Amino acid sequence: MADIVELSENLTNQIAAGEVIERPASVVKELVENAIDAQATQIDILVEDAGVKSIRVIDNGQGIPANQVKRAFLRHATSKITSRLDLFKVMTLGFRGEALPSIASVADVRLITATAGSSSGYEVHLRGGEIIEEQGASARQGTDIIVTDLFYNTPARLKYLKSQATELSQIVDIVNRLAFSYPQISFRLSHQAKEILRTTGNGNLQQVVSSVYGVTVARDMTDITIQDNDFKVTGLISLPELTRANRSYMTLLINGRYVKNYSLTKALVKGYGTRLMVGRFPMAVIQIEMDPNLVDVNVHPQKFDVRLSKEEQLMNLIEKAVRDKFEQTNLIPDAYENY
Ligand code: ADP
Ligand code: MG
């Protein structure tokens, strides 16, 4: 056996990238989440060739101070948590400090950023994890990051990518869910300069649903709201007549994070009882707020999978919210009112 050596930072970043950055949609997710964490109110996402050629995310958030830009590309470097205790009450989408170094290790990255009130911004260009160029630059407040040549140095990963249509649909899917999660942020997504999604950022979830699924779907959604000591559940669910053949039109958001959780979607479906035809599923956007102590988001690098400490209680609550909605007599979709 060879001697035991410590791997270089660049190599460990590439290994981490294997987990965090699976495909172009993972890059989009990480960059948009960073923009959200930076309190952006406008996020533009411009994609070329389903993200393989380039992914650009422009935000009007807080920006990164010039003297910290390089640090943002270091492994496990984050401004979002500082102690072990913070880990149990994460309110930001990011906290692992892995995305930027991972992306930079498998692509070409140019980032330009400026903070509020600073007279100038800063620009850095990395390729394969190495800094090629850096300099002061004039920029407006926020961050503009362009990722090109994704996976140019990891041919196996590049080969594993699916068709452009599939990769693009993954990107659209993740942006849709983020838009559901943050109706108060204006999102714009375009592919080859053609607009795919635009939301106003006026805070109205129903309008976001309309932008994503169309106005006729949005009209057939009705709102739910329920609360107990631990959870607050709000959102929009489809009337029983409006269904889909699979589960992917149900979006669960926990403290602003899109999660995949079979038990919770099952509870949602169960709430419809016999109102749904067999093999049909509702459409829904469910926003769940809870004490961050009750949810462990540090289960998987991509954070889709979370552990809930009171999962059954939450399942019952969701089921009840749906059941109560349809057991009301004289059902008029109150969605119409503010629409
Ligand atoms: P994490 O999001 O887990 O902290 P990242 O690697 O995604 O790790 O980002 C590292 C750091 O860079 C963040 O903690 C943040 O301080 C800064 N950063 C990244 N993207 C942005 C952005 N769009 N606006 C402001 N700061 C950003
Ligand atoms: Mg991040």
Image (cartoon, grey):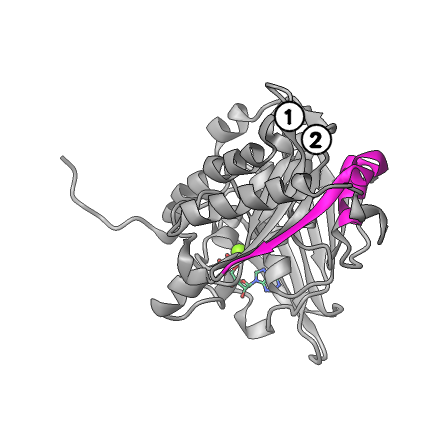
Write down the residue under mark 2.
240
Write down the residue under mark 1.
276
Q: Position of residue 100 (x, y in %)?
A: 52, 54
Q: Position of residue 66 (x, y in %)?
A: 60, 72
For the point 69% across and 79% down, the residue is: 118
Residue 116 in sight: yes
Q: Position of residue 339 (x, y in %)?
A: 86, 50
Q: Which region of the structure is painted magenta?
A: 206-228
Q: Residue furthest left?
A: 1
For the point 84% across and 47% down, the residue is: 336
In the image: residue 248, left or right of residue 72? right
Is residue 320 within the magenta segment? Answer: no
Which amino acid lies under the numbered mark 1 shown in the image of this protein? Leu
Going from N to C along the chain, the mark reached first, 2 or 1, is 2
Q: Residue furthest top?
A: 278
Q: Are marks 2 and 1 in contact (CB under 8 Å)?
A: yes
In the image: residue 75, left or right of residue 56? left
Which amino acid lies under the numbered mark 2 shown in the image of this protein? Pro
Residue 191 in sight: no
